[in-house]
Amino acid sequence: MSENRQWIRQLNVILPIGALVAILLTAVWSFAGYSIPNSVIVGDIVLVAVFFAFHAATHGLTNYVLKRLLQTLFVVWAIATLTFFLLRTIPGGPFDQDKALPPEVKAAIEAKYDLNSPLYKQYIQYIEGVATGHLGYSYKYVGREVTDIVASSAPASLQLGLFAMILAFIVGIPAGVYAAANHNNWKDNITMVAATSFISVPSFLVAPILITIFCFGLNWLPVAQWDGTSFYIMPVIVLGLQPAAVIARLTRSSVLEVIRSDFVRTAKAKGLKQRTILFKHVLKNSLIPVLSYAGPVTAGVLSGSFVVEDIFNIPGMAKHFILSVTNRDYPLVLGVTLIYATLLILANLVVDILYTYFDPKIKLA
């Protein structure tokens, strides 16, 4: 029995480290401008899935995860239903903005997209399409399926979001620990002033400043597009700065709270070095607030930032979140809404499971 427990503990360390290393290596490979084979992406997903499945199975979370996945299906259906009917209740239609369409032409277009059918029939057709993976045809991108539009634009947004969140964690967590370790001295003050500044300044202001300095002033980086490492640097920094600043502040506050705990005083009494105490004992117990923030912000960042993608002319999904609404493109609005909702739900589920990994005292029911 003790050997089995030791084996489980070892796998609980090896699996997440392996999955994290695989994701980081893939991200570095992609950031270097190389095309990532589908087999590598699938392998990363499998590693992550194996870790979560193993952790859930060994910590009595299987029923909880299955219940949450069933709830996810219900929530996605509810969001699809509400979005569908809300779009139909807004005054006007998808072709009302076109210039003086003759009635017969407008009727022919509406018949092509089944907009002249009773509302309940349109709803049934749409839900059947969602269940089979068919999100319909865009009204504005004539002849293109919504799934094709998303498939062509999602990789850029996912790349941008992944790079930005890696930057946020790599910068934010060490900065928060550094500030906490130097609590109430000038190093702490400078770090927190910088974090507060980056939180307060919006990306649409940071981007032009950095472009002016590094693109036009120093001529180090290209201004726009998404075509290789030099093109990635500027938008990733702009999108990752604010999450990094928030993570730094959350980490600092949490570390300062945990560092006053009894087990930390015991570790100090044993003569352990401050660095060992901070990174081996304190940090793991300080990540719960960071995880709470990371779930929804990661979903938002991965789905794309309209401001950053627009400024740097990145062909991502973010523009579809905005333009599909202004164009009254019902299928595209519904498609991107469902994708964002699914990302948000799954991100929160991942965060809930990670709670139990970093703090075994947390019980999920």
Image: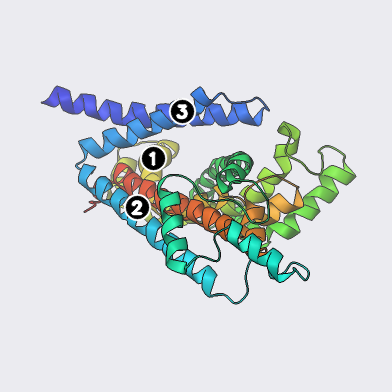
Amino acid at circle 1: Ile
Label 1 element class? helix
Instruction: Provide residue 93's location: percent of width, then percent of height.
Output: 62, 70
Instruction: Provide residue 279's location: percent of width, then percent of height.
Output: 42, 39
Marks 2, 3: nearer the viewer: 2
Of the pair 87 and 349, the residue shown nearer to us: 87
Amino acid at circle 3: Val
Do callouts 2 and 3 mark residues in contact (Cβ within 8 Å)?
no
Of the pair 309 and 264, the residue shown nearer to us: 309
Q: Is residue 55 left or right of residue 179?
A: left
Q: Report whether residue 139 is seen.
A: yes
Q: Earlier in the sequence, mark 2 or mark 3?
A: 3
Q: Determine the image quadrant of residue 54.
A: top left
Amino acid at circle 2: Leu
Numbered circle sitting on residue 73: 2
Number of residues whose C-alpha sits closer than 10 Å to that of mark 1, classed few (under 14), some (14–19) or many (20 or more) = some
Q: Earlier in the sequence, mark 2 or mark 1?
A: 2
Which residue was labeled with disc 1?
A: 277
What's the CA distance linking mark 2 and mark 1? 43 Å
Label 3 element class? helix
Instruction: Provide residue 325's location: percent of width, then percent of height.
Output: 62, 64
Q: Earlier in the sequence, mark 1 or mark 3?
A: 3
Of the pair 198 and 62, the residue shown nearer to us: 62
Which residue was labeled with disc 3?
A: 42
What's the CA distance linking mark 2 and mark 3? 23 Å
The residue lying at 56 percent from left, 50 percent from top is 303
What's the CA distance linking mark 1 and mark 3? 37 Å
**Residue, far bottom:** 91
Q: Is residue 352 left or right of residue 19?
A: left
Marks 2, 1: nearer the viewer: 2
User: Split into 4 quadrants, where in the image is the N terminus?
Assistant: top left
Marks 1, 3: nearer the viewer: 3
